Image (cartoon, rainbow, N blue to C red):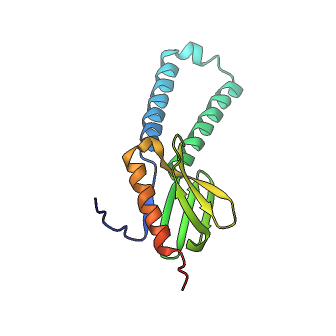
């Protein structure tokens, strides 16, 4: 099977996790609001400002986790690769990339770097199935094309 080359710049993002995070987040907000309204004004009036603040704080934590998931991505361009995992960003030159892998049972792709370390690429998640495998193949092809050749 032949594949159309990836046009640069190109960005991969997790699909299933973003979809489920959004759907479940909307459902959680709807459930919370429904329960709050169902309590009635007499019970809602008994909540202290500290208790209300705690509920808002927990909601902000959930929003922060959701936003971190939404911003996860891998962007490739002529100049290099940018990996954003939640709130951590890695800017890599093509020469720093040795390999892209998706080990059996791994939740997401991994990138092996020239300094002997590796980083995760949360944007390419194995739960996305064939979409993730296709992304890994495309990414591997780009790494192979941009690796320096020995003359």
Where does the C terminus fall, quadrant-wise? bottom right
- The percent coordinates of residue 19 (x first, y second) are 41, 41
Task: Say which of 86 and 94 sits in front.
Answer: 94
Residue at left offset 63%, top offset 33%: 58
Work out whether residue 140 or residue 149 is closer to the camera in this orientation and state it.
149
> Looking at this rendering, what residue extends furthest in the front direction?
151
Residue 111, placed above or below residue 78: above
Q: Residue 16: where, in percent of width, then height?
A: 42, 42
Q: How many numbered discs? A: 0
**Residue at 54% in and 72% down:** 80
**What is the quadrant of residue 129 in the picture?**
top left
Q: Which quadrant is the N terminus positioned in?
A: bottom left
Q: Looking at the image, which residue sits at the far left?
A: 1
Q: Is residue 97 left or right of residue 4?
A: right
Left or right of residue 129: residue 101: right
Residue at the spot 42% in from the left edge and 46% down from the top edge: 15
Q: Nearer the viewer, residue 147 or 25?
A: 147
Residue 7, position as x, y percentages in the image: 37, 70
Q: Looking at the rendering, which quadrant does residue 55 occupy?
A: top right
The residue located at (50%, 68%) in the rendering is 143
């Amino acid at each position: 099977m032949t594949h159309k080359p990836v046009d640069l710049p190109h960005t991969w993002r997790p699909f299933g996790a973003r979809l489920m995070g959004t759907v479940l987040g909307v459902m959680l907000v709807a459930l919370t609001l429904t329960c709050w309204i169902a309590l009635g004004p007499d019970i809602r009036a008994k909540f202290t400002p500290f208790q209300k603040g705690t509920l808002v704080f927990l909601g902000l934590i959930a929003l922060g986790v959701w936003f971190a998931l939404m911003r996860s991505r891998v962007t490739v361009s002529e100049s290099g690769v940018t990996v954003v995992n939640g709130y951590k960003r890695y800017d890599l030159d093509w020469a720093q990339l040795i390999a892209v892998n998706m080990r059996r049972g791994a939740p997401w792709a991994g990138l092996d770097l020239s300094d002997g370390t590796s980083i995760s690429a949360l944007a390419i998640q194995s739960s996305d199935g064939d979409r993730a495998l296709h992304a890994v193949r495309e990414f591997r092809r780009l790494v192979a094309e941009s690796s320096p050749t020995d003359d």
